[in-house]
Image (tube, grey):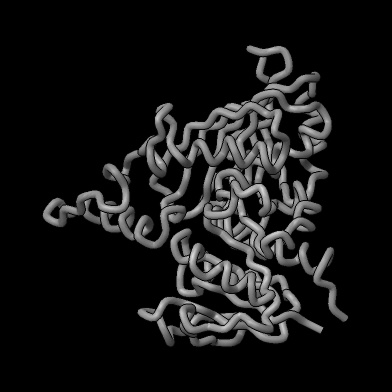
């Protein structure tokens, strides 16, 4: 016996990826609905070997549906998630709207699967920020062994994290570099993204950090441990898909790099590729389309007593968004919404 599943925002990058992953992982589905805004009404999207026509999100009745995966942004989520939840449909939301609500669990299944049990307070579960999701998968097994005191992370985030408009802007600007008559000024990003890097994602806050950086701090504390100190610098880079992160970790206890490598090899959701030779590491291009979070460049940091450095790469449309949402749905079904 399967579930009745809704994907809201089915025509966007993340919504389409949710449909792909539901099919790839053979999620037990009896019925599925693809929802979109009225301007996209009737657009066809793929679900395995089927083609679905999108239905109107505004007019959709969530009564009788089990799970809704939302990829529609905070404004639309604010309107439609409570309606779905009130109708008895559990919402798994990809926006930032509910991440910091104490009554809404923020879940990465490899890290805090048991947190889904708290869904019933609002019938909503939050999906973390893409850059946070892959980092905490790497941090949790190490934290369990040696207890993390502090994390310093610099991110190298793909343009797809800003949606289709971000990808298009990189593509158009790159082409324009080779044809100077076709000038493409920045629209989605603050400065030219082609052949450039931009140390600015989301809006600036009073302390000089950006909201993206703040998200990584607050979400890591909520998901892993409120005692962990985190400082982040988030950078947009001219990559289509795949976020990379340089992570420096300070532990309370000593953790040898060889033991850390072994721990990460055994941890769920992680693939370690760490050879100290040319090309013996993973880059964003190589992680696209994969479910795993890849860890490379594991090494001691000799500048502090109990320090470790590592390189972390993941497909931001998958583990950073769609895959994690589907994994939450799987966890919810296995722990709470059991059928058959």
Task: Work out whether residue 59 or residue 302 is closer to the camera in this orientation and state it.
Answer: 59
Task: Work out whether residue 301 or residue 132 is closer to the camera in this orientation and state it.
Answer: 132
Q: Is residue 42 above or below residue 70?
A: below
Residue 287 showing in the rendered view: no
Q: Residue furthest left?
A: 181
| Percent x, y of residue 167 | 38, 57
Residue located at (68% from left, 35% from top): 275
| Percent x, y of residue 75 | 44, 61
| Percent x, y of residue 289 | 58, 61
Q: Quick one: quadrant of the N terminus?
A: bottom right
The quarter holding residue 62 reads bottom right
Left or right of residue 160, residue 17 in this image: right
Residue located at (69% from left, 75% from top): 88
Q: Quick one: quadrant of the C terminus?
A: bottom right
Residue located at (45% from left, 49% from top): 158
The quarter holding residue 51 reads bottom right
Residue 70 showing in the rendered view: yes
Residue located at (51% from left, 79% from top): 35
Left or right of residue 230, residue 186 in this image: left
Task: Work out whether residue 177 or residue 207 is closer to the camera in this orientation and state it.
Answer: 207
Q: Is residue 300 above or below residue 22?
A: above
């Amino acid at each position: 016996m399967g579930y009745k599943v809704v994907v809201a925002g089915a025509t966007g990058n993340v919504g389409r990826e949710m449909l792909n992953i539901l099919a790839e992982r053979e999620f037990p589905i009896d019925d599925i609905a693809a929802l979109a805004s009225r301007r996209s009404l009737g657009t066809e999207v793929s679900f395995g070997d089927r083609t679905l026509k999108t239905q109107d999100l505004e007019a959709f009745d969530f009564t009788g549906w089990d799970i809704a995966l939302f990829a529609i942004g905070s404004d639309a989520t604010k309107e439609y998630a409570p309606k779905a939840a009130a109708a008895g449909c559990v919402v798994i939301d990809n926006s930032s709207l509910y991440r910091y609500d104490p009554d809404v669990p923020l879940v990465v299944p490899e890290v805090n699967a048991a947190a889904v049990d708290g869904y019933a307070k609002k019938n909503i579960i939050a999906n973390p920020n893409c850059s946070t999701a892959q980092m905490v998968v790497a941090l949790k097994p190490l934290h369990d062994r040696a207890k993390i005191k502090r994390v310093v992370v610099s991110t190298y985030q793909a343009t797809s994290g800003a949606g289709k408009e971000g990808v298009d802007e990189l593509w158009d600007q790159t082409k324009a570099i080779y044809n100077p008559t076709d000038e493409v000024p920045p629209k989605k990003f603050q400065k030219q993204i082609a052949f450039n890097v931009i140390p600015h994602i989301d809006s600036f806050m009073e302390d000089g950090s950006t909201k993206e950086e703040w998200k990584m701090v607050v979400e890591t504390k909520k998901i892993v441990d409120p005692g962990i100190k985190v400082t982040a610098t988030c950078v947009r880079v001219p990559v289509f898909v795949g976020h990379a992160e340089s992570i420096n970790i300070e532990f309370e206890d000593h953790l040898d790099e060889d033991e850390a490598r072994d721990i990460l090899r055994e941890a769920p959701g992680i693939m370690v590729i760490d050879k100290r030779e040319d090309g013996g590491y993973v880059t964003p291009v190589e992680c696209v389309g994969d479910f795993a979070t890849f860890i490379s460049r594991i090494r001691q940091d000799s500048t502090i007593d109990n320090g470790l450095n590592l390189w972390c790469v993941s497909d931001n449309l998958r583990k950073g968004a769609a895959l994690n949402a589907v994994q939450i749905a799987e966890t919810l079904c296995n722990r709470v919404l059991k059928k058959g």
